[in-house]
Image (tube, rainbow, N blue to C red):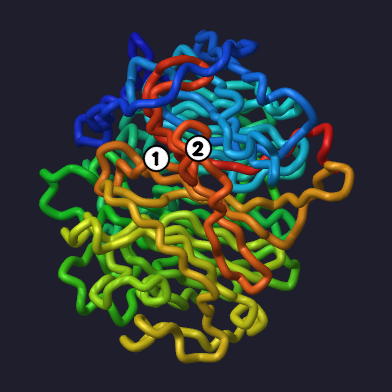
Amino acid sequence: MRRISLRRPGGTSRLAACLAAVGVVAALLTTSGGAAASPEPERVTSKFTGTDGVTYTATNHLLPAAQGRGREWLLTWAGSADPAKPDFLAVVDATRNSPTYGEVVNTVTLGPNLANEAHHMQYVWHKGDRLFAGALLQDTVFVFDTSKLPALSLAGVNSTVDTPCGTAPDAFQVLRDGTAYASYLGGPDVPGPCTYTNGEVREGNGAAGSPGQIVRMDRDGKTLAEIPAALAEGEDPKQCGNVPALKKATCANPHGIMVNEEKNIMVASDFVEARHFLSPKLPDQANLARQTVRVWDIKNRQNPKLLSVSKMPDGPRAGLEKSEMWHESRVVMEPALPHKKKHKGAFASSMLGGAIFYAPDVTVPNPKWREVFDDTTAYRAAGAPKDVTGGGDAGSWLMVSPDDRYLFHTVMGQSTAYGKPLDKTTGMLYVLDIRKLLAAGDNPKCNIDRLKEVYRGGLERDCPAVTSAMPIRDTTDGGPHWGAMDNFEQTYGGKFRETQQIRRLATSNYFIAGSFSGGGNHEVCMYDLDRKGKLKQDRAFRDERSGKPCVDFDRTSWPHGETGPARPHGILFTVSDSVLK
């Protein structure tokens, strides 16, 4: 098959141009003020020449505060608000009690691509892992060597010519062998049939369309396999809209991706047909808002077998919503998997539906999904007004703690979806105790099927229980979209080790430019979690310039220069190799 680049002269991709046409790329943010310029940094550049012939660069700008003993770091993948300025990875000191706690001690600027729309990295980092960072609009994945943190070096680049059957890389799961699975939300580079690595063929309607795919990459980002996400026989055309229409309809637009290597299971959730979802010209968007979750058997890592495609059910709130778009099943953004061997189930959350679903066993051909929690209950716990519900609340990041005790979830807020005042609705970070639900094994009783359970939580004894709901108020048109678990703890002698008991979470407040909840306040915040699952904002994690809690990315000056505000998206806890056991 002939491989066709999406990139246009000057670093702008066909995918970027396509999404810009429907308003995904917004106007520039206003540059805010900042303190005096940073001290002169130490600059170290690494290079990689991709299969597209482009030489990519990554330049560290290490401040004096980055020197000294190894520490814990919060990596933040950020896009410049000025499309003429470089996107970058910010390295933030996340070491408790460090004199530079919360400071940006290094920025790693990327070139030559501009306006990447910096998106997600992998969900959790382990010692020895490479860092995979997706550029949504440039259809590119940057891979970094993390062995010399806080410095990062470019280990590889997967460009648009390396994945002709898919566009818009979204999320990543790194396996123990160093390879990674990546979800590609959008369709092939060009409309028409596309042949995957295993020889199967699917018809697609082009970049940022359908069907998306899964890509397996080696530790340097090289494509090992393009894996079809769409069923060969097609899917329900009433449920799965495609514009332009496909001969075989599909809902395959995978966003979130989770892997359990012990069970040889991979789960991905379908989001939207991206290039049309935000267009005000479409009369009917409902069947572009996906309701499905896909499960693969990955015993053959190179050629996973698609086991099931399941539609999430609607709940008792659906009949009351003014729009079909806010039904519980709409826009399934993220899945989450338990970790213990005895737990075979999976969770999934809907972005516009504001609900969490659970299937007790996803290894079977027909998993039995049911709603087990409505975000409305968490809103009550967070003290929101009674008329604020989960409908259209932009639920986002979802993760199970390594000890299978808690489920963490961020919600951006309901304001734009319902036209409510920005000071009335709120984003939030909440925590659910899921131990009873997982302990129920193959026969859980929990099922949100009555309206009072929407507001009070499930009435069955094994339903998830809210342990904490932290309101995150943001009067911009946005809210907390992404999150990260701190899976490390510090031991005696300044060393670190991985832990199953999560005691800290971080959030980033930005989604995607031009979207219904796109802007956000561009803050990265830290929250402590106590042994009872209660959240408290870590107010010691402060911006070194404003002195206020949270790291503010709406600043003028960075270690790499006076480039203005940036938009933080993916965040990840890491530790210097020298002090990590």
Can residue 331 be seen? no
| Quadrant of the snapshot with the C terminus | top right
Tag 1 residue: 522
Disc 2 on helix, strand or loop? loop
Residue lying at the far right of the rendered structure:
493
Question: Residue 538's spot in the image, x, y percent?
Answer: 56, 53
Distance from the alpha carbon under mark 1 to that under mark 2: 12 Å
Question: Residue 204's spot in the image, x, y percent?
Answer: 34, 38
Disc sitting over residue 463 in the figure: none
Relative depth, front residue between 480 and 382: 382
Q: Residues within 10 Å of mark 2 (few under 14, many from 20)?
A: many
Horizontal side of 421 relative to 70 (left or right) equals: left
Dot 1 or dot 2, earlier in sequence: 1
Question: Residue 371's spot in the image, x, y percent?
Answer: 43, 76
Q: Is residue 227 above or below residue 234?
A: above
Q: Is residue 77 above or below residue 521?
A: above
Tag 2 residue: 543
Q: What's the residue type where badge 2 is placed? A: Asp
Disc 1 on helix, strand or loop? loop
Q: How many marks?
A: 2
Q: In the figure, residue 85 lies in which quadrant?
A: top left
Q: Which residue is drawn at the image coordinates 45% and 19% (left, top)?
A: 36
Q: Which residue is drawn at the image coordinates 49% and 44% (left, top)?
A: 550
Can residue 127 be seen? yes
Q: Is residue 371 above or below residue 200?
A: below
Q: Which residue is drawn at the image coordinates 23% and 75% (left, top)?
A: 387
